Every structure is written in C-alpha cells, then in structure tokens.
Amino acid sequence: MSMLEVRNLTVRFGNMVLVDDVSFTVEPGERLMIVGPNGAGKSTLVSAVAQGVPYEGTVLLDGKDVRSFKPAELARRLGMLMQTHFVGYSFSVEEVVRLGRYAHARNFLAARSEGDNEKVAEALASTGLTDMADQSVLTLSGGELQRTFLAQVFAQDPNLLILDEPTNHLDLVYQKRVFGLINEWLGSPRRAVLAVVHDLSLARAFATRVMLMCHGRLVCIGTPEETLVSEKLDAIYEMDVRGWMHDLLVCWQ
Ligand code: ADP
Ligand code: MG
C-alpha cells in the first residue's frame, strides 16, 4: 500500500483551475520532488494534500481518506513546511518549534513530556538554532525564520514531510545541511518526503522521483533521468534549460 495516494485532485478558484486532475503516489522511503515554472500550481497542490486548501478528489494516507483523520492524528502522519511564513506574535524560536509537538500531546493542556524537550532540542540543534532559542521570531532573518519552521516540522516528526521550497532563503551551508538532514531523517522506516524545489540540480541530486508540473497539470512523473530531460524541461519552461545551466557552470571552470 502506498504511503500517500492522491487521486484526481483538482483545485478551483472561481472559474480558474489551479490544479487539474492530478494523481500520483508516494512510497515509504521516497523523496518525490515537484518542479515546474512559477504559477504551475505546485504550492496549491501540496497545500491541498496537506488539507490547507479545499479540493476535489481523494487523498489517502496508508489507504485511509485523510478527511477521516482527527487533527492531531493527521499531524502525526503529515507535516508541512509552507513556502511563506506568517509570524504575528513575538514568540521565541523555541516556542515556535515547540508548537510542532502539540500533535503528540495527549490533550491540549498536557504537561510537556521529556520526549518533547528532547525532540525540540534535537530540532534546534540540527537546524543550527540552539544559540538563538530565546530570540523573538520577529527579529529573524529570512533564512533563520525558514530554519525555525523547518525545525518545527522536524520536531513534529510526522511520517510524511511535505516541504514547499525548503531551501528558500537558505545559504549554501544550510541548503546542504537541510538535504543531509532529510536523508538522515528518512533512515527510519515508514517515512517519506514530498518536496517542491525550484532548483533543478537539487532535484537531480536528491530526488528518487520527480514530478513535472505546468499550468496546473502533471506533465510527467518518473526517475530524474526520465523526467529532467531537455525535451520536457524546454517545453515547460519555454527556454533552453540545459544550455542555461551549462552556461552558469562554465563560469566556474
Ligand atoms: P507555484 O507554487 O507553482 O508557483 P501556485 O500553486 O502558488 O504556483 O499558484 C498557481 C496559480 O494559482 C498561480 O497563477 C497563482 O497566481 C494562482 N493562485 C494561487 N492561490 C490563489 C488564490 N488563493 N486565489 C487566486 N489565485 C491563486
Ligand atoms: Mg509555490
């Protein structure tokens, strides 16, 4: 049984179709990466899978319709890092990361457990935020804020991690570290990652499978070798993708 099965998912806004009849599966241990031009519907698709926007169609987790899960149960199975973050209050970094643990509380007022403190400390350390734990999130740089929300979803520790441009705002050191962390995290059984990335080289290096999206539709899905090919990329980006990547690399020689 697939860990995630998406069947005929469609998202409409007024009379616009933002995601058009998309079906795919994610298997345990997978790193499925979604790529495609701006406005292709990538964020809308992953938000719908994470139950963040209304959709038509079916989303199954381990064969069960997600609509039947209670919020805390859903949060133990599925965690999402959004492309943009909203911070309205002066929470500390640690407080924001700790919010990820509510999925594991027996009830909303349950006392903090030892396990929670450990998970929070681990998530802070692995994202390089231990020294900033008490700083207000309102004062963070874009990259620090991105790492805070990454730490939150790692502390949440769901089975399926959905990441929308996880390396957005991150410098090279943290880009590398985030993908290292994801790979490490995938070392335990019954885990998988579904990520939107705009960097095709990252998709090529880290994906087990890649989905190409354009105009709300799934163009193709398969191994990086099958999908990240000039013929397909040039059609969806309407440019010579390989030529541009090559020109960029040549500058380093
Ligand atoms: P991507 O993540 O691939 O760049 P999005 O999923 O964010 O694309 O957006 C897909 C399209 O849907 C875009 O053209 C965007 O402007 C539009 N869109 C997204 N959210 C809304 C919304 N709430 N209302 C109207 N249009 C939207
Ligand atoms: Mg997006």
Image: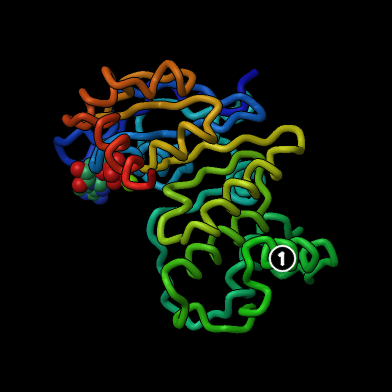
Count of numbered circles on the image: 1
Question: Going 50% across and 70% down the picture, which residue do you hit?
Answer: 144
Badge 1: few (under 14), some or many (20 or more) residues near its Cα, within 10 Å?
Answer: many
- Asked if 230 appears above or below 247 in the picture, the reply is above
Q: Please identify the residue farthest to the left as the structure is shown.
A: 15
Q: Nearer the viewer, residue 14 or 238?
A: 238
Q: Amino acid at mark 1?
A: Val
Q: Please identify the residue farthest to the right as the structure is shown.
A: 114
Question: Going 35% across and 30% down the picture, which residue do you hit?
Answer: 56
Question: Going 16% across and 36% down the picture, which residue do you hit?
Answer: 16
Q: Quadrant of residue 101?
A: bottom right
Question: Going 31% across and 37% down the picture, which residue do you hit?
Answer: 245
Element assignment for label 1: helix
Q: Colour scheme of this structure image?
A: rainbow
Q: Position of residue 224 (x, y in %)?
A: 46, 23
Q: Please identify the residue farthest to the front as the structure is shown.
A: 253
Q: Position of residue 171 (x, y in %)?
A: 47, 61
Q: Quadrant of residue 200?
A: top left
Residue with the mark numbered 1: 120
Decide if ligand 2 comes within 8 Å of the CB at mark 1.
no
Question: In which quadrant of the rendered image does the C terminus lie?
Answer: top left
154 relative to 54 in the view: left or right: right
Q: Quadrant of residue 2?
A: top right
Q: Nearer the viewer, residue 57 or 30?
A: 30
- Asked if 2 appears above or below 204 in the picture, the reply is above
Q: Nearer the viewer, residue 220 or 73?
A: 220
- Asked if 173 appears above or below 253 in the picture, the reply is below
137 relative to 100 in the view: left or right: left
Q: Position of residue 244 (x, y in %)?
A: 25, 37
Question: In which quadrant of the rendered image does the N terminus lie?
Answer: top right
